[in-house]
Image (cartoon, rainbow, N blue to C red):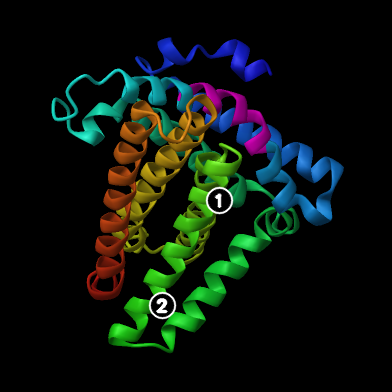
Amino acid sequence: MVLEWLVDVHKMEGKPWKMVFFGFIYSVIAAGLALLMLPKFAGPVMLAFTMVAFVPLMISLMKEEELRDEGRKNKFAHWLVKEHWPAMKFFICMFAGMLLAYTILFILLPKQYATNLFSMQLDMITSRSVQLGALIGDGKLLAILANNFKVLATGLFLAFIYGTGAIFILSWNAAILGTLIGDIIKTSIQTGAVPLSIGKFLLHGIPEITAYFIAGLAGGIISIAAAKHKLGDPQFKEVVKDSLELILLSVVLLIVSALLEVYVSPLIG
């Protein structure tokens, strides 16, 4: 893989901002190939190409994180998020590059091409708005939580079985948010209004996506540990315990995100 050859995980954790560039370039390349090869199915093909490009790099990163967990002599010496912050910055910068690419593509591409690329995201945004618009109070909160936990469980499963859950979560959510922001910007340009409503989505979107980052990281760490150790090994138990604490943190963040989405975000814009 070219990206695996270009990017040294050890060096990149010290300069994670470079992943913004790679996230952007590989997303644009994936979109171009998808439109060229299978334009009618460009959306899923784009996400598949993006995932394939980053999988080897992510597996290397997960191995580093699993070794970092094994090397902790004092499990209380570091707070979990601080311990895994280098990998988190890696994910965040990659996500930022993908988000920038998808937003620009949605804005600049002709309508037909943009619709082909982002039809799934447009359908999901529209259907979710319609479904949740008919709900109020606790019902709306429970519906959002159910959807978020479903995405979380899917990412964990993919991360544990294939080691690619984090990539799926990154690319899927970047495409959704890029479509949403791109649509808001295009509408604002046409109407001349300031797109303050972007803040409405970022307020609950940031903790929600952070939760998915953490869960994908945890699932990948468990997957690598399961491949290296027997289930009863003390090292495996410690890694699993660490990962379960990360998953618990992601659940808390999803609850906070849902509360913000129901009770605070509607007040903005």
Say which residue label 1 marks.
172
In the image, what residue occupies the spot 60% across and 17% down? 4
User: Which type of secondary structure does the marked residue at label 2 adopt?
Assistant: helix
Q: What residue is disc 2 on? A: 143
Q: Is residue 20 left or right of residue 48?
A: left
Q: Amino acid at mark 2?
A: Ala
Give the x, y percent position of residue 17: 39, 23
Name the residue at 25% across, 35% down: 81
Total marks in image: 2
Label 1: state its secondary structure: helix
Q: Examine the image and state in which quarter residue 36 appears.
A: top right
Q: Earlier in the sequence, mark 2 or mark 1?
A: 2
The range drawn in magenta is 50-61
* Magenta span contains residue 55: yes
Check the image and report above or below for 38 versus 78.
Answer: below
Residue 129 seen anywhere in this rendered image of the structure: yes
Checking the image for residue 268, the label placed there is none
